[in-house]
Image: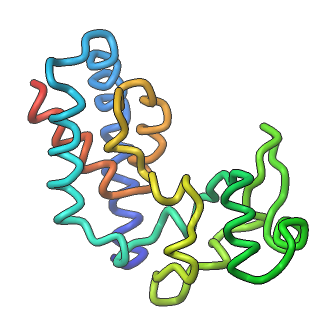
Amino acid sequence: MGDHLIEENYRKAKAKEAEHKKFLGKIKQKPPKNFDQTMQEIHDEVFERVDCLSCANCCKTTGPLFTQKDIERLAELFRIKPSQFIEKYLRIDEDNDYVLQSVPCPFLGADNYCSVYEHRPKACREYPHTDRKKFYQINHLTLKNTLICPAAFEVVEQMQKTFK
């Protein structure tokens, strides 16, 4: 997915943002029966179609939160102290969390492969959180993610068809 397709996804998601917000709000007020199970099926089906390696927009534009475990795991991988890892790659944000000093992610290759994939932060493993239980609890985040991630956009579109 080239930059033009990322831009196209942003335009589509922006155009549907108000509709998506209203729809997700209804789901939150009254979650359908078997919601988590159906969401898992939607998530799996969308991720069979969407190739993250053709996009990697999340890695290019947003930085994950790093937990202490993430920091320790990656420091061990690089054979440096956690404090050295923090100094080299991270900063503390306004919420007092460790995040990347800059984006794109320094571990993202030109081929969109992650050089620390097996050791990547928990936030990266879980992104865009569309298979999370009680998914309707993170609507604000989901709306933001539809603007970044074509798969998140597709998940919400599929939800609209499924939960009419």
Asked if residue 127 lies left or right of residue 122, the reply is left
When asked about the image quadrant of residue 130, the answer is top left
Closer to us: 27 or 131: 131
**Compared with residue 110, is residue 148 higher up or lower down, i.e. above or below?**
above
Asked if residue 158 lies left or right of residue 11, the reply is left
When asked about the image quadrant of residue 52, the answer is bottom left
Marker count (numbered): 0
Q: Residue at x 73, y 82 (%)?
A: 78
Q: Position of residue 148 (x, y in %)?
A: 45, 55
Q: Position of residue 154 (x, y in %)?
A: 24, 50
When asked about the image quadrant of residue 34, the answer is top left
Quarter of the C terminus within the rendering: top left
Q: Residue at x 89, y 73 (%)?
A: 84
Q: Residue at x 57, y 71 (%)?
A: 119
Q: Position of residue 21 (x, y in %)?
A: 36, 27
Quarter of the N terminus within the rendering: bottom left
List the single residue furthest toward the top: 29
List the single residue furthest toward the bottom: 110
Q: How is the structure coloured here? A: rainbow
**Compared with residue 41, is residue 115 higher up or lower down, i.e. above or below?**
below
Q: Residue at x 37, y 39 (%)?
A: 132
Q: Position of residue 60 (x, y in %)?
A: 56, 69
